[in-house]
Image: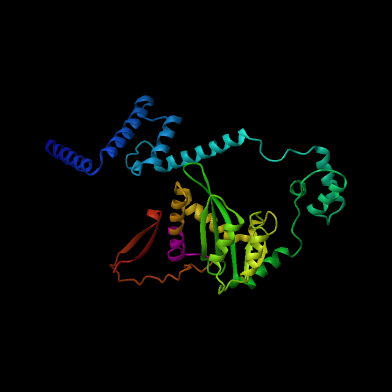
Amino acid sequence: MILTDLMLRLVLLLFGSFRAALHSRADLVIENLALRQQLAVLAHTGRRGRVTGADRLFWVTLRRLWARWSDVLVFVKPETVIQWHRAGFRRYWTWLSRRQRTGRPSINSGLRELILRLAAENPTWGAPRIHGELLMLGLSISERTVSRYLPRQRPHSGALERWMQFLRNHRDAIAAMDFFTVPTATFRILYVWFAIDHAKRRVLHFDVTDRPAAAWVVQQLREAFPHDSAMRHLIFDRDAIFSDRVLTTVNALGLRPARTAFRSPWQNGIAERWVGSVRRELLDHSVVFNERHLRRLLGEYVAYYHQDRTHYALEKETPGGRLPSASQGAGAAIVARRRLGGLHHRYHWAA
């Protein structure tokens, strides 16, 4: 028993020496620093370590600077460090928002009551009509503010059915575009634009920028929809960036623009669901460093989304037409292929 223990210690010592020889001196210094920090936490707080703000900052910073940080992390899980980073991101932007006056000044109760009165006495009036009447009364207020104080109205009878019928009738010729935002490790905000095919669930094109503008969107449209494109309708929301210049380009490409109603993301459900899939299956498990890093991650995810990921709407097939793997017999093994760094896998029968 003693001899076995000595042999085990010797093997571990040799393995540690071999590992140290492969790593640079800088790696060893950082590794020792990380291990000493964890020992200090445990020595200070006992067996069940209580993590302080300084400890969280140390590991969030180390994750940003050192690729092998998770190899030496012992006292918490790597997912916990990612959660710390997100919490720091939220606190950072909360702190920024407190330094500046945000939003428009609130309106007084009398003006709010007048808006509600006009809406009640004129059921067919919308925000533009009520806003015009308020301007005629000499009251300075924006149309957007008026719309926020109007009572929420139910859609007209049959509106949902008509929209769903439009989607069914033109499904093979409909595409959608949208934006979503991604925070980086340095608290920058990156904007992702994408276009997706309704029928096949294929992502036609995507790109990343930190300064979205109408001219940039126009260039993305030209790359996503060549003149021989089979798409005939393009669904998008009422974001201000989709300006008249964007509408002109959409029409010039042979597409008929179909804008969704205000506060109705369900009308662009295919695009919204893709954003949800990207967040759940990729971004919730990653810390983005910059535009290039995000573009690479999304490129890998789109390849996985097209070639490997099955879709309920496509009857459990893939947009890229993945074929089932033929069984090699009763004793054959199933092999897993890593996707997105091991976040997901594709399975097939071993040859």
Residue with the most extreme top position: 44
Q: Is residue 173 magenta?
A: no
Q: Is residue 285 left or right of residue 6?
A: right
Stretch in magenta: 300-312
Q: Nearer the viewer, residue 340 or 3?
A: 340
Q: Nearer the viewer, residue 74 or 48?
A: 74
**Residue 190 location, x and y as percent?**
52, 49
Q: Is residue 318 left or right of residue 179?
A: left
Picture quarter containing residue 177?
bottom right
Q: Is residue 104 above or below residue 119?
A: above
Residue with the most extreme left position: 3
Most common secondary structure along the magenta stretch: helix
Q: Is residue 167 left or right of residue 314?
A: right
**Residue 120 location, x and y as percent?**
85, 50
Q: Is residue 100 above or below residue 198?
A: above
The quarter of the image holding the C terminus is bottom left
